[in-house]
Image (spheres, rainbow, N blue to C red):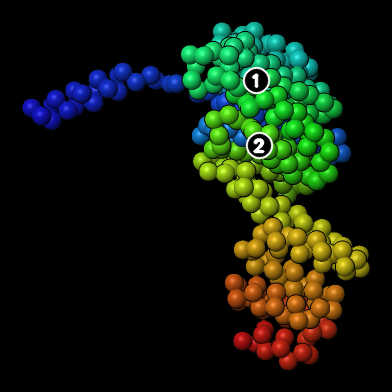
């Protein structure tokens, strides 16, 4: 009887739960387009679990979308499809919100591959920040700002300064699209960010496929779903992802004979990804090419301790040509 009673209780509890709850992604985000690289990107942070999986959508050569507040996840695919049909971002937003009875609870921003952008903040998203009965969102700010090739938006924010800071950081940024988005998120948080705190963040960057060996338009696709300081962790993950790009740049500079510049870039790559034996091996090569043989040996020792088979690579690498007669080098690769 007790088992039957428990089963009945569980069934009634399951029936009482809603099949699908609408999740408020109170957050701030930035979408951008880089004419030089043709990259499109979205950066987002929220005091909501897995916001990086919910808010951003992007397709190379087409556009990018951020859907938040009471996030309607159909907005992303619909907006991309409408952009492909030739609609402007403003027309896209009008179309998807006109068709949505819940539009007053939504916030969405769209940018296309021409750099044109548009954003929408529903009436209820703004009103709830002034509703004294809403203990979660009362006192916050909601809205957006836009500029050349970007739009920054948010809700439940400390103040309008959050999106203003995002915009300013993005505009003055000089790194890759992903780094500019990361800097923008950091700047927003420095102004108070989401009034409820921090939890999740993500960055999505896409670009047209130009390499026949590449099978995806996603240049960067990283996120932190739940972390006390998602900015710190997202920055770390981004650095790991970008370290290979810096290492490639270092190798190219080395081939051009720009030894000093190559070494400095490789130092940065190794700092960005300190757990990578390949970054350390590359650092050893750059030190060797610069004639800093002791530093080369130290870096090579770290790399080969992590992966002993790199000793075979060291024996064949032309970067170590002038070190091959050194006792310390031959002892290291012969161990």
Q: Quadrant of the N terminus?
A: top left
Q: Secondary structure at mark 1?
A: strand
Q: Quadrant of residue 218?
A: top right
User: Label 2: how many residues lie within 10 Å, few (<14), some (14-19) or many (20+)?
Assistant: many
Label annotation for residue 288: none
47 or 324, which is in the foreground?
47
Q: Is residue 110 left or right of residue 68?
A: right
Identity of the residue drawn at 84% across and 38% down: 172
| Residue 135 in the image, given as x and y percentages of width and height | 48, 20
Spatial CA span between label 1 and label 2 = 15 Å
Residue 206 appears anywhere in the view: no
Q: Residue at x 70, y 11 (%)?
A: 94
In the image, residue 48 sits, relative to residue 21, either above or below, namely below
Q: Which residue is mark 1?
A: 142
Kindly identify the residue that appears in the image at 75 percent across and 32 percent down.
165
Q: Position of residue 177 (x, y in %)?
A: 77, 41
**Residue 247 shown left or right of residue 154 in the figure:** right
Provide the secondary structure element on which disc 2 rests: helix
| Whether residue 315 can be seen here | yes
Query: Between 296 and 130, which is closer to the camera in this rendering?
Result: 130
Whether 273 is drawn above or below 172: the answer is: below
When the figure is inspected, residue 27 is found, relative to residue 72, above or below; the finding is below
Q: 292 above or below 75? A: below
How packed is label 1: few (under 14 Cα within 10 Å), some, or many (20 or more)? many
Residue reaching furthest to the left: 1
Q: Nearer the viewer, residue 211 or 333?
A: 333
Residue that numbered label 2 is attached to? 189
Residue 44, percent across and down?
64, 34
What residue do we see at 54% from left, 21% from top? 137
Where does residue 126 sit, x and y in percent of width and height?
62, 14
Residue placed farthest to the right in the image? 257
**Within the image, what quadrant is residue 98 found in?**
top right
């Amino acid at each position: 009887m007790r088992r039957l009673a428990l089963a009945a209780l569980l069934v009634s509890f399951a029936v009482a739960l809603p099949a699908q709850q609408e999740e408020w992604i109170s957050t701030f985000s930035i979408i951008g387009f880089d004419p030089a690289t043709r990259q499109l990107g979205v950066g987002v942070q929220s005091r909501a679990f897995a916001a990086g999986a919910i808010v951003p959508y992007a397709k190379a050569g087409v556009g990018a979308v951020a859907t938040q507040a009471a996030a309607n996840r159909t907005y992303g695919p619909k907006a991309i499809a409408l952009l492909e049909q030739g609609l402007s971002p403003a027309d896209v937003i009008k179309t998807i919100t006109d068709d949505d009875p819940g539009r007053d609870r939504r916030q969405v921003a769209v940018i296309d591959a021409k750099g044109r952008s548009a954003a929408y903040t529903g009436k209820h998203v703004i009103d709830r920040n002034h509703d004294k009965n809403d203990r979660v969102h009362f006192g916050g700010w909601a809205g957006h700002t836009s500029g050349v090739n970007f739009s920054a938006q948010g809700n439940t924010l400390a103040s309008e300064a959050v999106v203003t800071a995002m915009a300013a950081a993005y505009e003055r940024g000089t790194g890759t699209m992903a780094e500019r988005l990361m800097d923008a998120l950091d700047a927003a948080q420095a102004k108070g960010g989401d009034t409820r705190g921090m939890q999740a963040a993500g960055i999505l960057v896409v670009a047209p496929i130009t390499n026949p060996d590449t099978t995806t338009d996603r240049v960067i696709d990283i996120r932190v779903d739940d972390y006390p300081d998602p900015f710190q962790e997202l920055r770390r993950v981004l650095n790991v992802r970008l370290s290979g790009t810096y290492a490639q740049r270092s190798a190219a500079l080395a081939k051009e004979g720009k030894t000093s510049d190559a070494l400095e870039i490789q130092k940065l790559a190794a700092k960005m990804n300190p757990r990578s034996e390949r970054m350390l091996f590359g650092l050893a090569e750059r030190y060797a090419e610069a004639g800093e043989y002791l530093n080369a040996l130290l870096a090579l020792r770290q790399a080969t301790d992590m992966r002993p088979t790199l000793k075979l690579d060291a024996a064949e690498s032309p970067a170590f040509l002038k070190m091959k007669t050194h006792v310390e080098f031959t002892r290291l690769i012969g161990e």
